[in-house]
Amino acid sequence: MHLFDTDTLFEEQSAGILSGRITDNWSINGNPNGGYLVAVAAAGLLKSSAKQHTPVLTANFISRCEPGKADLSTWEIAQSRQFCRMEARLLQKGREKMRMLATFADEPESCLVRRYETPPPEMAALEKCVPVPVLPKYTMYENADVRLDPSCAGWMENKLSTVSENRGWFSFREARPFDICAIAMAADAFPPAVLASQGMMAWVPTIEISINIRHIPQTKWLKCRFRTRFINCGLLEEDGEIWDENGELVAISRQIAQLRQAVS
């Protein structure tokens, strides 16, 4: 079993109650990555959802999660001919850490309209992009291969940009096909786009993330673009697009996050 599947596997203890472990294999500065936590909840919900495709996942991060034992409560809110609406709550030591709403649908039989008014992001070839370095306590990048377009990577050397944008490629270091949980992971795997303009001093904890998955890709790599346009009152948004290598839209996302300055 792939490490990602092992680390998102929670076993059912009773109806709607699952237990497992949040591991330290997908952490950012020692904190479990938000996309990883969304993937854990999505994997749990898919065990009981009557529908299994094109989900909309919206998670609120209530308090800081940490590696260790966790429980996942899941239940169905409502079901219609088109949609199955679910909810999940992730708890550690009896305290709620994350709450997620999910809407699943049947696999679409056809796509009557396919219109992309924004094209896939332009970026350098994979071999010319800059790998996000593997640093102590940043274990996610030991397992996820994230490479930035050189035009977006100046912040690593304190060469800041006037635009808060990160573009680049995503894949697992150990090959694994993409599915709903892996796409959720990819949607939060890049360094915050705001670092491009604000530098490494910024700390950006996510308050909420919404991920709308449109297509399950068959390609090895995903092409990703994340952009922040507004920073004020300590808050920012980050809008994301994920595409496959064939130019098909995989997912769109939006995060709301805090901008904090690191304490020296």
Image (cartoon, rainbow, N blue to C red):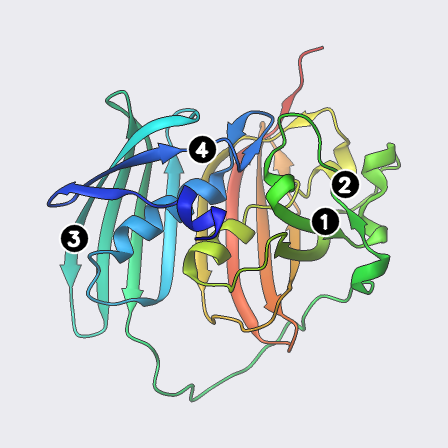
The vertical placement of 224 against 16, above or below, is below
Name the amino acid type tagged 2: Ala
Name the amino acid type tagged 4: Thr
SS category of the residue bearing label 2: helix
Name the amino acid type tagged 1: Glu
The vertical placement of 34 against 105, above or below, is above
SS category of the residue bearing label 3: strand
Residue with the mark numbered 2? 196
Disc 2 versus disc 4: nearer the observer: 4
Residue with the mark numbered 4? 23
Name the amino acid type tagged 3: Ile
Relative to residue 91, is residue 256 drawn left or right? right
Decide: marks 2, 3 in contact (CB < 8 A)?
no
Relative to residue 149, is residue 31 drawn left or right? left
Decide: marks 2, 1 in contact (CB < 8 A)?
yes
Residue with the mark numbered 1? 165
Q: Distance between the residues labelled 2 and 4?
A: 29 Å
Q: How far apart are marks 2 and 1 (CA)?
A: 6 Å
Decide: marks 2, 4 in contact (CB < 8 A)?
no
Q: How far apart are marks 3 and 1 (CA)?
A: 36 Å
Which percent across, then down, holds residue 60? 38, 38
Q: Which mark is on residue 77?
A: 3
SS category of the residue bearing label 1: strand
Which percent across, then down, holds residue 207? 46, 34
Q: Tell which circle, 1 or 4, labels the residue nearer the N-terminal end.
A: 4
